[in-house]
Amino acid sequence: MGKRTRITKQQLKHDVLLETTAKGTKFIEEHLSKVLIGLAVVLVVMAAVAMITRSQRATEIAANAALAEASQILNSGLLAQAQAQYESVIDLYPGTRGAAAATCYLGSIAFNQQDYSQALVRFDQYLDSHAGDRTLDRLALEGKASALEQQRAFGDAAAIYEDMARHTDDEPVAAARYLHAAIRNLRVAGDWEAVASVSQRLIDTYPDTPWAGEARMTLAEARVHL
């Protein structure tokens, strides 16, 4: 019989390590192509995102430039050309802030031309598709409320002004101004209960604003009618 060789713990540990290493190497060899493909996909996605981001930035810049050009044309008094340029911004750069602003500006132009129906169309187009910019939102909402007021839809106009006041409660002067506009429309509509309620709200919430004194008078007037 051959002489038995006793395997030491160190040799056993070494063999296990080799076996584990071998399994790891085999696993890597079997899956390396998959890993590389996955990495390539990630790199392609990252590159695509970077390209899209650059493209979006370039598109926004181009839209802003076209918007500025349209505004210059408008300031020169060339109304028809300005309108065409604003339309071009909307058509060429959909989804951009420039296109959103152009939509609002077309609403303002229509309002100034006393075409209140077209103004409402433009302001609603902005609110339905582009809302989210605080400045443009306020321009569109104020424009819509003003157009409704001109069309004698006083209740609808008042509702918009009241909603705007709720969303600008961090700006006391602006909020009070919107409540004052709501009171004006409610008063013309003859809704004295609402006049009293909104007047009291203005007095209680914004007592130091320029419209608080007038609100006290409309509140007294409303109480006579109630």
Image: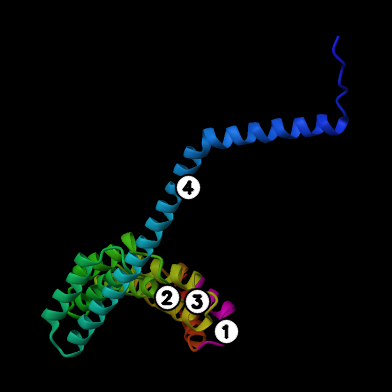
Residue 198 appears left or right of 125? right
Q: CA distance from mark 3 to mark 1?
A: 11 Å
Q: The disc labelled 1 sits on which kind of residue?
A: Pro
Q: Are marks 2 and 3 in contact (CB under 8 Å)?
A: yes
Sooner in the amino-acid sequence: mark 3 or mark 1: 3
User: Which of these two is toward me, 193 or 90?
Assistant: 90
Task: Tell me how far mark 1 sits from mark 2, CA to CA.
Answer: 15 Å
How far apart marks 2 and 3 lie (CA) works out to: 7 Å
The mark that comes first in sequence, 3 or 4, is 4
Instruction: State which region is magenta.
Output: 196-209
Q: Image quadrant of residue 88?
A: bottom left
Query: Which residue lies under the disc numbered 2?
Result: 183
Q: Amino acid at mark 4?
A: Leu
Q: Residues within 10 Å of mark 4 (few under 14, many from 20)?
A: few
Q: At numbered mark 3, what does the secondary structure look like: helix, strand or loop? A: helix
* Separation of residues labelled 4 and 2 (CA atoms): 63 Å
Say what secondary structure mark 1 lies in.
Answer: loop
Q: Which mark is residue 39?
A: 4
Q: Which mark is residue 207?
A: 1
Q: What SS does tag 4 mark?
A: helix
Disc with the residue nearer the chain's start (4 vs 2)? 4
